[in-house]
Image (cartoon, rainbow, N blue to C red):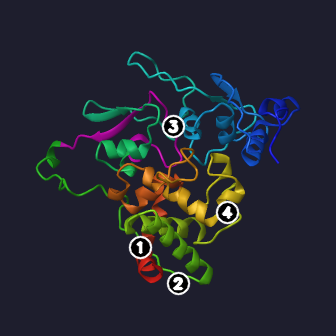
Amino acid sequence: MRLNTLHTRAGIAQIGVPAAVVGILASTLGAAPAAAAAPATYTVQDGDTVSAIAAQFGLATVDVLTWNGLSWRSVIYPGQSLALVAPAPATPAAPAPVAAPAATTDPIVPTATDTTHTVVAGDTIFDIAQQYGTSTDAVFAANGLNASSIIYPGQTLVVATAAPAAAVAAPAPESAPAPESASAPTPQTATLDAVQAENAALIIRIGRDLGVPDRGIAIALATSMVESWLSNLDWGDRDSLGLFQQRPSTGWGTPEQILDRERSIRVFYGGASDPNGSNTRGLLDIAGWDNMSLSDAAQSVQISAYPARYAPWEAQAYEWIALYG
């Protein structure tokens, strides 16, 4: 049954239904009310999610996350103020924002020999590292950050430090990428049970239906193994669910949609046929993903606190493609 003209989003809101529930009702019942004009800021109410707030004002979830320095795994809370417009570009004369998040350690002061980057809206540590031909770990180390740190527009990051004069005569080969860790990860292996094997075969089949090369399918298999043991879990960290531990509160879909294995796999791959549209960013939406390390490519989608866990499953993922593909 469809909503009649009396049951608009505004009408529902007038009887006290939270914004998050309004968004769910509109999605479920097929209503398509006009989005309210977005104010400059919004105060989070009990039951709100970032995706529901974005939908209420006709905004993209990924934009609201970016404007507020949030990730897909960030938690919002009642009383929190969220920006609903893009921040103004930082100018050289402007001081650092007073409300900027504190660094996890004492801030790094660039020297005259350092190369620096001024963060702009939409930047990520990974994107900055790629731009300057370095690794995310190197940027973390140079700035006293870690995988859970938040960067903000106007912040200055050290992205490269000049080598000491004594080292100039013997530089590292230009073609060698910076290692992600001090030593190569120990390969992980596993023999899949019937349920896991069925899920692996489904990831492979959908990848091939979408024209994803084996490199992308291997990334999907390794990611699912790390996130859920290739199982369609109905539980996880906070509200994470399914094969890839996607979260309803950060726009990946309703719990029912995320637990739909085929849909969640297509959302992970992303691209033009992504059933989630532009609300989330899948593997195929990452520029240059096919030239990244498996760990970096998976991390670009998942934004995990433990990005090094993906790489050890790379060789095993290719064996699963040969076995179940």
The amino acid type found where label 1 is placed reads Thr
For the residue pair 48 and 274, the one nearer the viewer reads as: 274
The amino acid type found where label 3 is placed reads Ala
Q: Which residue is mark 1?
A: 186
Q: Which residue is mark 4?
A: 259
Label 4 Cα crowd, 10 Å radius (few <14 / some 14-19 / many 20+): many
Q: CA distance from mark 3 to mark 4?
A: 36 Å
Residue at image position (65%, 41%) is 51
x then y, percent, for residue 124:
44, 42
Disc nearest the viewer among 2 and 1: 2
Q: Which residues are magenta?
A: 140-164
Q: Secondary structure at mark 3?
A: loop
Q: Which residue is mark 3?
A: 103
Q: What label sits on residue 239 in the rendered view?
A: none
Residue placed furthest toward the right: 15
Q: CA distance from mark 3 to mark 1?
A: 32 Å
Q: Secondary structure at mark 1?
A: loop
Considering only order in the chain, which callout, 1 or 4, is on the residue closer to the N terminus?
1
